[in-house]
């Protein structure tokens, strides 16, 4: 039953096109991020309800408002009010 579990969205990103491909260990950064997030969510009992990825977008140079994938994630999974 998933109705009692926390529902989360994941955004995977790399800031350079080189990171999209493979690192020195022949591992692609985006699939590694996805695998780590799935493992973390499973350990916490969370359900991933949506995933997006940004390829070659600098979080330092591009404002959050101009990052389409980030806007999608924020719209689907708004912050909780505590």
Image (tube, grey):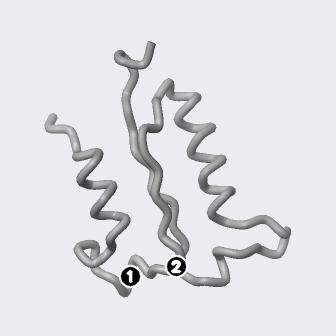
Residue highlighted by disc 2 = 15
Quadrant location of the C terminus? top left
* Residue 18 in picture, x, y percent from top left: 67, 83
- Of all residues shown, which one is farthest toward the left? 81
* Residue 56 in picture, x, y percent from top left: 52, 80
Quadrant location of the N terminus? top left
**SS for dot 2:** loop
Q: Residues within 10 Å of mark 1 (few under 14, many from 20)?
A: few
Labels 1, 2: front one: 2
From this view, report whether residue 3 is shown above or below residue 53: above
Q: Relative to the observer, which residue lies in front, 43 or 77?
A: 77
Q: Earlier in the sequence, mark 1 or mark 2?
A: 2
From this view, report whether residue 25 is shown above or below residue 76: below
- Of all residues shown, which one is farthest toward the right? 25
Evaluate if marks 1 and 2 touch, with contact meaning CB atoms under 8 Å apart. yes
Q: CA distance from mark 1 to mark 2?
A: 9 Å
**SS for dot 1:** loop
User: Would you say 31 lies left or right of 65 here?
Assistant: right
Identity of the residue drawn at 67% across and 66% down: 29
Q: Residues within 10 Å of mark 2 (few under 14, many from 20)?
A: some
- Of all residues shown, which one is farthest toward the bottom? 61
From this view, report whether residue 27 is shown above or below residue 38: below
User: Would you say 35 lies left or right of 75 here?
Assistant: right
* Residue 42 in picture, x, y percent from top left: 57, 30
Identity of the residue drawn at 64% across and 74% down: 20
Residue highlighted by disc 1 = 60
């Amino acid at each position: 039953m998933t109705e009692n579990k926390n529902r989360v969205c994941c955004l995977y990103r790399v800031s350079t096109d080189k990171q999209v491909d493979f690192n020195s260990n022949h591992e692609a950064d985006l699939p590694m991020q996805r695998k780590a997030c799935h493992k973390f969510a499973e350990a916490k009992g969370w359900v991933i309800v949506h995933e997006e990825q940004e390829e070659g977008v600098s979080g330092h140079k591009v404002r959050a408002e101009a990052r389409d994938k980030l806007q999608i994630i924020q719209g689907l999974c708004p912050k909780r009010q505590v």
